[in-house]
Image: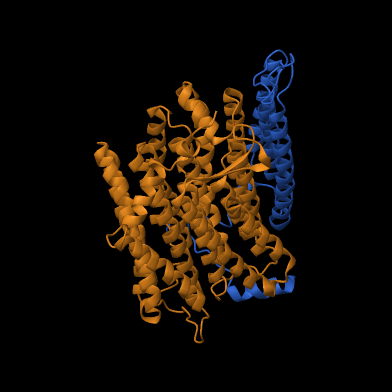
Amino acid sequence: MLVLTPILVPLVTALVCAWLPISRQRAVAVLGSLVHVVTATLLLSEVATHQALRLELGGWPAPFGIELVVDRLGATLTLLAAVMGAATFVYGLSDADPGPRAKTRIPLVYGLLAGVGGAFSTGDLFNLYVWFELGLVCAVGLLALACTRRSLEATFKYFVLNVLGTLLFLIGIAYIYATTGHLGFGALRQAALHEDGSRWAALVAVLVLASLVKAGAFPVFSWLPAAYHTLSAPVVGLFAALMTKVGVYTVLRLMGDVFPTAPGLMNTALAAVAIPTMIIGVLGAAHHWDIRRILAFHSASQIGYMLLGIALGTVSGYAGTLVYVVHHAVVKANLFLVAGMIHRTTGSFDLRRCGGLFVARPWLAVIFGLSAMSLVGLPPSSGFWAKFGIVRETIVLGRFAWTGVVLGVGVLTLYSMMKIFFEAFWKKAPDGARMPSGPTGLGPAYLVTGTLALVSLGVGLWPEPLLDWARSAFVDHNLATATEGLP
Amino acid sequence: MIWWLAVGVAATMSAGIYLLLCRDMLRCIIGISLVGAATNLVVFASGWTRGHAVTTPPFVPDDATVLSGAANPVPHALVLTAIVIGFALVCLSLVLVLEIVQQQGSTDSDQLRDAEPPMDEHGKPAILDDVSPWDDVARAERAD
């Protein structure tokens, strides 16, 4: 039953909220997100003490029916999704939320959370496609909600690229099924180990390419910077935390867990995608002056780091990617949420129009500084350990060119973060900039962003549990042990 | 039979991709639905074609043999799911494009420069004027 909660809790909350008037929706949304966090924590502790949890839906035994499998990887990301959902809804209680007060917004956000939770907890390839589609439809709804020219345009760009991605995924599923006769992760893994799985490399590559569209990797990432900045602050925080991570999770699951026999050529190809993603993303960010667009391009850049960790093809690389996913979801969402607060305080997202916040809002500067430091990867922050894991593994494997790119992109990231800090916080407010005289109603927003910044700092000061946990997710608690004894 | 299916998939897919690459947004949506149809054919083909049981049905009792030419029903179920999802997505996207066309007065996707405006004369990115939060709230309340 616990296995179903990542899907059931958001779905039930979405349905309940859909019936309620807007005035009551927010309270129910926060309550639902608390339940979501509690059940996800229970799930994580259950997975930590026992093996992976499995549920055969409809009572069909494993290789035939659809199975839900939550292992350490899935449970970690489920908890991450629940926590970021809660952060979004608490932040939404503040006045930093300029989004359209539409009745459908909170149910759509919960639909998105259900799609993400389903993707993290399913053990079946076709079922994963269905959760992709649920997430996609809800994301399209959220993007189109404002119904302005800008948001509809962003919706169109997002929709076309992502639908192509899911269709490509479906083609990959058809090929895999025609070749192996299996759709379940466990059965596919057994088949890949016992038969010559390396000849399926081209088929797995189709699935990975489709996931890369979702992840926002280099040649196919253009939906990301076109769409993110049209969303309202709390929703863009959730998008930044989860949308691309579903794609990264799928690549990690496919290459690290389900098809471990994929030839090394695939890892090289993935690195050839990851490195341009890192460089192009960070260069795009350097060009822009709108805080949201800077952060959106950085999202693409950071996806490159996660993909590079998978491309290393070792347990340490996979663990590094998992740590990076957790770190990046928290930190990038926090930066987007802080951007919303900057907008509420100065009236603009554009760095040329805001300034003087270091004097006016010193605590906001501290929260931003901590998160920005973490994104760059400076020592007492979670970003340092996330990057350290990947840099160390590139050196261990002798890929010194990759090490150079990782460190160089880190310097350019520092440049963008310094730009935001100097322009929005350090310089004097430009002429004609307005500051609200009365209270800004940002209490819940400070609570959320402050907590997330402390989480990042806490992980930076005490990284051992997360690093060990991430490693264990790929050593003895992965799908292999969860599916032992299958025919 | 498998070759006829392959030719059909290839034709549908290339027509879909051709339309998808058009500047016209409505053609683009029709292209997506054609690519979706070709995808469904691929999934369908993974189950059965005459003379070639690509995959055998998963449930066959021990004392029985697979009928010659029997279809594997699993891909059919998959195709049904995919058709339903695809239909909903195409409807949704048609409404989306109609709304865009009504707001901007043309179906030309080159004119979609509102979210990503071109650079100004100094080569710097243009400032995105944001709807102030308070206006937006007022508008949404009117809409209720």
Comparing A310 with A225, the one in front is A310
- Position of the C terminus of chain A, as image quadrant, is top right
Q: Tell me residue A27's x, y (percent).
A: 63, 73
Residue A97 seen in render: yes
Residue A146 in view here = no
Please state if A280 lies on the left or on the right of A208 as rendered.
left
Q: Position of residue A51 (x, y in %)?
A: 47, 45
Give the vertical position of A93 relative to A55 (above or below): below
- Name the colour assigned to chain A in the rendering: orange
Q: Quadrant of residue A419?
A: bottom left
Query: In percent of the image, x 73 and y 45: which residue is there?
Result: B88
Q: Where is residue A411 in the image (x, y as percent from the top left)?
A: 29, 54
For residue A123, which quarter of the picture? top right
Name the side, left or right, on which B114 lies relative to B44: left
Taking the spot 70% from the left edge, 67% from the top edge, the residue there is A103
Front residue of this view, candidates B52 and A479 = A479
Colour treatment of the image: by chain
- All told, the count of numbered labels is 0
Residue A173 vs residue A315, the one in the foreground: A315
Which residue is farthest bottom?
A438
Residue at 49%, 51% in the rendered image: A75
Give the image location of residue B72, x and y in percent. Answer: 70, 24
Tell me what hue chain B is rendered in: blue
Query: Along the line of sight, which residue is nearer the eye, A160 or A52?
Result: A52
Figure check: A155 above or below B26: below
Residue at screen point 50% across, 69% down: A340
